[in-house]
Image (tube, rainbow, N blue to C red):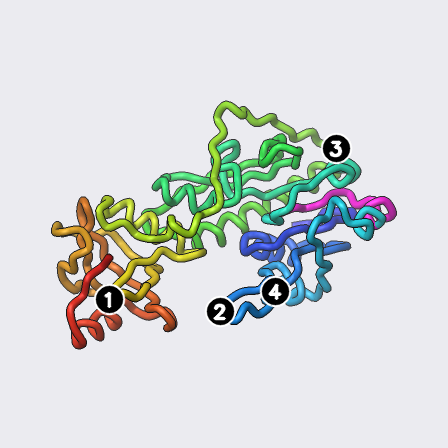
């Protein structure tokens, strides 16, 4: 693909931003890469770079840090002096205000992993999987002050397989969205008008996943449990408790069986089969508290040798 001409800034922070940046950086150059500064993380609260920080450095860029871009004189001055053709804003987590919104020739272009106006907000991939959708997609749109409400520049749908999880969708939607954005920039450079207004009456919201949503409720259906596990496979990870200790559940699949919700029904080829309110799920990959991820079958066999099991 022919790289778009012009001057572009990339603004982002999270995993989706990092995936999009890596795809775009292979095809074009950025005059600036702006991201959030390292954040305290883990039990020791050590400063950890955000995903885009690491992706930018791997691509040979020295990222600049911003807490509130629209109020920082350094970036306001750079915007006036450099006059970028567009700001590419992906998974940035900051409200973008004028003059950043309207001074660039093509404004601020965003890649959003949903078919807007569906799933506006911070967690479109996770919310779509929680809802068990059979189709989602990715949109390129121009930012306005209202969240994810700007005019659509391009959209593409994507079928969701029953086994797809948030990691799978992030990867494919980031690649599709980046390719779409490259085409959009080329068309804008050629003078094409691409904007199509969103119908806000059809909008749905995808708020950030709350901590309490990560716990699996075994009284719900097997499909709901499986959808929760695959939806949260990106972060923070669905969890249950066994013997008073938390166990994260990273991969699963629906299985045959009935029983008291949370009861271990049998061991299958991939792992333990656990009863739900309706049906059962087979756990494939887990992470016991304080330990690395592992195959669920090996984990459950170890527990059986040391006592009974109760999924809470």
Coordinates of residue 250 in the picture (x, y in percent): 35, 60
Extent of the magenta region: 78-90
Residue at x-position 73% and y-position 50%: 9
Residue at x-position 53% and y-position 40%: 121
Tag shown at residue 70: none
- In the displayed structure image, the side of residue 269 where residue 89 appears, left or right: right
Tag shown at residue 191: 3
Q: Which residue is mark 2?
A: 43
Which of disc 4 and disc 1 is earlier in sequence?
4
Residue 79: within the magenta? Answer: yes
Labels 4 and 2 touching (C-beta < 8 A): no
The local crowd at label 1, few if under 14, some if 14 to 19, many if 20 or more residues have their Cα within 10 Å, is few
Question: Which of labels 3 and 2 is toward the front?
Answer: 2
Q: CA distance from mark 4 to mark 2?
A: 16 Å
Q: CA distance from mark 3 to mark 2?
A: 52 Å
Identify which residue, 222 or 6, lies in the foreground: 222
- Badge 2 marks a residue whose secondary structure is loop
Q: Which residue is mark 4?
A: 49
- Badge 4 marks a residue whose secondary structure is loop
The local crowd at label 2, few if under 14, some if 14 to 19, many if 20 or more residues have their Cα within 10 Å, is few
Question: Which of labels 1 and 4 is toward the front?
Answer: 1
Q: Is residue 270 above or below residue 132?
A: below
Coordinates of residue 277 in the picture (x, y in percent): 19, 46
- Badge 3 marks a residue whose secondary structure is loop
Which of disc 2 and disc 1 is earlier in sequence?
2
Labels 3 and 1 touching (C-beta < 8 A): no
- Badge 1 marks a residue whose secondary structure is loop
The image quarter containing residue 192 is: top right
């Amino acid at each position: 693909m022919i790289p778009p001409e012009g001057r572009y800034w990339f603004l982002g922070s999270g995993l989706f931003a990092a995936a999009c940046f890596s795809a775009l950086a292979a095809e074009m150059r950025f005059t600036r890469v702006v991201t959030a500064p390292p954040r305290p993380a883990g039990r020791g609260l050590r400063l950890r770079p955000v995903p885009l920080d690491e992706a930018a450095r791997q691509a040979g860029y020295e990222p600049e840090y911003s807490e509130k871009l629209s109020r920082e004189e350094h970036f306001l001055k750079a915007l006036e002096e450099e006059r970028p053709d567009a700001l590419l804003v992906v998974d940035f987590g900051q409200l973008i205000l004028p003059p950043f919104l309207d001074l660039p020739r093509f404004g601020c272009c965003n890649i959003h992993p949903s078919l807007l106006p569906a799933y506006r907000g911070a967690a479109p991939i996770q919310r779509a999987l929680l809802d068990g959708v059979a189709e989602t997609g990715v949109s390129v749109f121009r930012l306005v002050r209202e969240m994810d409400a700007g005019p659509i520049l391009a959209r593409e749908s994507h079928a969701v397989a029953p086994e797809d999880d948030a990691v799978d969708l992030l990867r494919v939607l980031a690649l599709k969205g980046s390719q779409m954005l490259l085409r959009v920039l080329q068309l804008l450079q050629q003078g094409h008008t691409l904007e199509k207004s969103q119908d806000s009456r059809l909008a749905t919201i995808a708020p950030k996943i709350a901590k309490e949503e990560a716990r699996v409720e075994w009284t719900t259906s097997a499909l709901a449990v499986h959808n929760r596990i695959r939806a949260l496979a990106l972060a923070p990870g669905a969890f249950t408790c066994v013997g008073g200790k938390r166990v994260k559940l990273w991969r699963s699949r629906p299985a045959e069986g009935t029983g008291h919700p949370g009861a271990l029904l049998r061991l299958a080829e991939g792992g333990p089969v656990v009863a739900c309110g309706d049906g059962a799920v087979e756990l494939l990959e887990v992470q016991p508290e304080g330990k690395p991820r592992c195959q669920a079958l090996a984990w459950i066999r170890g527990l059986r040798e040391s006592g009974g099991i109760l999924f809470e």
